[in-house]
Amino acid sequence: NTVNQKELFGHPIGLYILFFTEMWERFSYYGMRALLVLYMTTQTIGDERGPGLGWSSKEALALYGWYTMLVYVMSIPGGMIADKVLGQKKSVLLGAIILCIGHGVLVLTDPWAFYTGLALVILGVGLLKPNISTMVGGLYKEGDIRRDKGFSIFYIGINTGSLLATLVIGGVVAKWGWHAGFGLAGIAMVFGLLVYIWGQKYLIHVGNLQPQTKEENSVSYGLLFEKLFKSQKQLVIAIFLSIVSLIGWYKLGWGYGLLFLFLTIITSLLMMVYKDLNNQIQKDRFLVLLLSFIMVIIFWGAFEQAGGLMNLYTDTKTDRILFGLEIPTVMFQSLNAGFIILLATAIAGYWANRKLKGKEGSSLFKMAVGIIVMGFGFIFMVFAAMQFEKSGTSSMMWLVLAYLFHTIGELCISPVALSFITKLSPAKYASLMMGVYFAATGLGNKVAGIVGESASDFGEYSVFLSIFIFTLIIGTLFILLLKPLQRLTHGAEDNEK
Ligand code: GLN
């Protein structure tokens, strides 16, 4: 990918187009997500915001868990379509259009509209989210030290969208009802679409389909699966995983069964992609990416307690009175996005400086540090739980501190991982790898739900403490393994300037 010359504030103008497109997309995603559980659990009659679905909170949380996971898991097919058929740029366009329709359908009150709308949003995000992220990487040449910073700026866009949405959508729903809230998400997405279409002139060189005529660029997923049946070792692994999936289906129900089968297909695909890569450098880099995704799953598995367990903790066990006024629980959900906007540039700057001084500043290192810092945030939740056990309430300072550390950790891992993927992926599978990354975050979300639920058996204190210890161990482990992992990247980040 060549770089578009036009720049603004030291970055290609295309970055700002992607920034605002993604800002509006995240506005619609997080705005709608904020309403989802509440809408499902509201009674079917007698609520001034209009009828909800009247579900139990268990039913609602179950659908919520599957929804938030699927949204990200669909990034894998979304990435595959980009690599094989559309290229990233057109995939984003198609995703944005589907999202406008999906959020639009949710404005209708019929039951069919609810499921259809959700399904369209899942498809739309799957097409848009991974591919717009890969495009950010495409704006920078190999070895350009601005790439990490570019991703941090992009990440501010993400969180500005999420912050604005969570601040305004509650008010809109209170005044005009649920479906006006869904409509607002739709309007936001239309803005995103318009910005994207308008900005095409700044994106001429990014996100285009690699010319498939060249042998090294051609992608055939069908052929890869065909090869699977000829490769005995891989086939044995695939069959073994399929059996595990079927047992999972039998023991845990069809949802998990389907998930395991899906994971089996993806694992088989990744094994075959690995075999298909041209040389050892590509293969090693592919491997180190997959290993780093272990950190990603664990990170989000802990981090995503925010919307679940920590949210409930805020609601029921925290003293939220400040200067005589009660702070609503939902407000605490804005802390993360707010801290990101405040800290993103500073943290990216800190790492860039460190690197220029010749100190360790590799992505893998940052990601491991990110896990540890985020995990450290849970120590404050342990203190909160201790205080609650003693006095029957706990200070909201603990939550603020926990979210602060969670955010610093997130900034060390999340934008960094996006950038890292664009540095290490083989060009022809670049979108697929971004899709796998987002699927890993989706699995992390699901893990978070399962861990959060376990609090009703073990109590918050033990859950928070266990997360702290576990993340500390994993982060330290990756730091200890840094040298050999680093070797697998074959100097992908050595000459950044
Ligand atoms: N909050 C970030 C976003 O919406 C990260 C989400 C994720 O990686 N799963 O982009």
Image (spheres, rainbow, N blue to C red):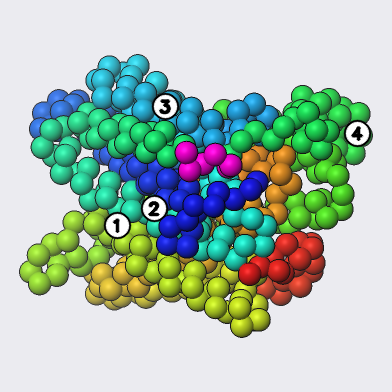
Residue underneath mark 2: 157
Query: Circle 1 — which element?
Result: helix
Residue underneath mark 4: 231
- Tell me the quarter of the picture where residue 351 sits: bottom right
Residue 238 location (% of width, % of height): 79, 35
- The reply to whether dot 3 and dot 1 touch (C-beta < 8 Å) is no
- Tell me the quarter of the picture where residue 251 sits: top right
Q: Which residues are magenta?
A: 201-206
Residue at position x 45%, y 51% in the image: 13
Disc 1/disc 2 C-alpha distance (Å) = 15 Å
- The reply to whether dot 4 and dot 3 touch (C-beta < 8 Å) is no
Q: Is residue 64 left or right of residue 244?
A: left
Disc 4/disc 3 C-alpha distance (Å) = 40 Å
Residue at position x 30%, y 53% in the image: 163
Residue underneath mark 1: 334
Residue at position x 79%, y 63% in the image: 490
Predominant SS along the magenta part: loop
Name which of mark 3 and mark 2 comes first in the sequence: 3
Disc 3/disc 2 C-alpha distance (Å) = 20 Å
**Mark in the foreground, 1 or 2:** 2
**Type of amino acid under label 4:** Ser
Residue underneath mark 3: 97
Name which of mark 4 and mark 3 comes first in the sequence: 3
